[in-house]
Amino acid sequence: MFLNAKIETDRLILRPLIEEDVVPIFKMATEPNHFTYQPDTPPADVTEIENMVQWSKNCNQKNTPEKIYKFNLAFVLKETLETIGIGGLGPHDIDPQEIEIYYGIQEAFQERGFTSEAAEAILNYGFNTIGLKKVIATVHPENTASKRIIEKLGKNDCKILSGLTGENSAFNSYLLYTLVKSE
Ligand SMILES: CC(C)(COP(=O)(O)OP(=O)(O)OC[C@H]1O[C@@H](n2cnc3c(N)ncnc32)[C@H](O)[C@@H]1OP(=O)(O)O)[C@@H](O)C(=O)NCCC(=O)NCCS
């Protein structure tokens, strides 16, 4: 369910990361606006992405439905087989007991519905194949596209994060969405 995952949507295949994803992910992660609405920072060099891909593979070896270390998936465009984005499921920084959904896509492919398509497929996989009952998402309040993606995923609870300290303080004022599997 993790190592051999292959999730198909109309236009995309979502699959675990491989070495060929390093260059397109590095390209995406170094685009000027990629981290505008995220607490992380761009990679210093391509080695960081190489290491991340290797780490993702290691996580996938250990992932179980009960404990997901990180389940990273490349968004591969069926038409050309190029990797255009990345997303997945993994423990959240604030509370590692909670599993969050996340995603990002190269600028050249934005505003064409690709991430909405991928996010819906990831969430369904989380609920129906992995067996999760709840998935969360934290979104910067000004990240209109991301808010829209989450809001389209169904009936969600949303609250504004506040009072966080230390490393987590970067998430103050972020929206915390809770997506619950419908019975
Ligand atoms: C956020 C992000 C993933 C959106 O990806 P995308 O593929 O452009 O999203 P979609 O095309 O599926 O669009 C989702 C919705 O947002 C809207 N939207 C897309 N870009 C928008 C923008 N710049 N401003 C306002 N709305 C926007 C779309 O119209 C769509 O709404 P609709 O279905 O009602 O028409 C992309 O901008 C990105 O990678 N940003 C950098 C990383 C990031 O912020 N990740 C999310 C962290 S929470």
Image (spheres, helix red, strand yellow):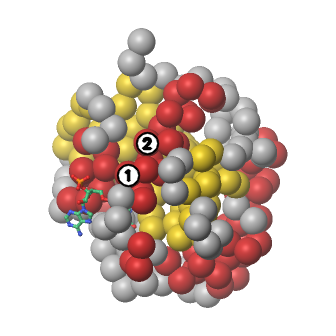
Horizontal relation, residue 55 to residue 126: left or right: right
- On-image quarter of the C terminus: top left
Task: Give above or below for 114 relative to 160.
Answer: below
Please identify the quarter of the rendering in which residue 74 is found: bottom right
Q: Three-letter amino acid code at disc 2?
A: Glu
- Counting from the top left corner in percent of width and height, residue 49 is at 65, 75
In the rendered image, residue 32, in percent from the top left (x then y), is placed at 37, 85
- Image quadrant where residue 108 sits: bottom left
Residue 13, image quadrant: bottom right
Residue name at image x 35 percent, y 65 percent:
112
Circles 1 and 2, Cβ within 8 Å, touching? The answer is yes
Q: Which residue is mark 2?
A: 120
Relative to 171, say whether 3 is above or below: above
Query: Could one spot residue 49 in this view of the protein?
Result: no
Q: Where residue 145 sits in the image (x, y, percent)? A: 26, 59
- Residue occupied by mark 1: 116
Report how far apart the C-alphas of labels 1 and 2 lie in the structure: 6 Å
Query: Foreground: 46 or 172?
Result: 46
Callout 2 environment at 10 Å: few (<14), some (14 to 19), or many (20+)?
A: some
Rendered view: 95 above or below 88 = above
Which disc, if any, is residue 11?
A: none
| Residue 46 visible to the viewer | yes
Q: Total number of numbered labels?
A: 2
Q: Is mark 1 within 8 Å of ligand 1?
A: yes
> Quarter holding the N terminus?
top right
Q: Secondary structure at mark 1?
A: helix
Please, what is the three-letter code of the amino acid marked with disc 1? Ser
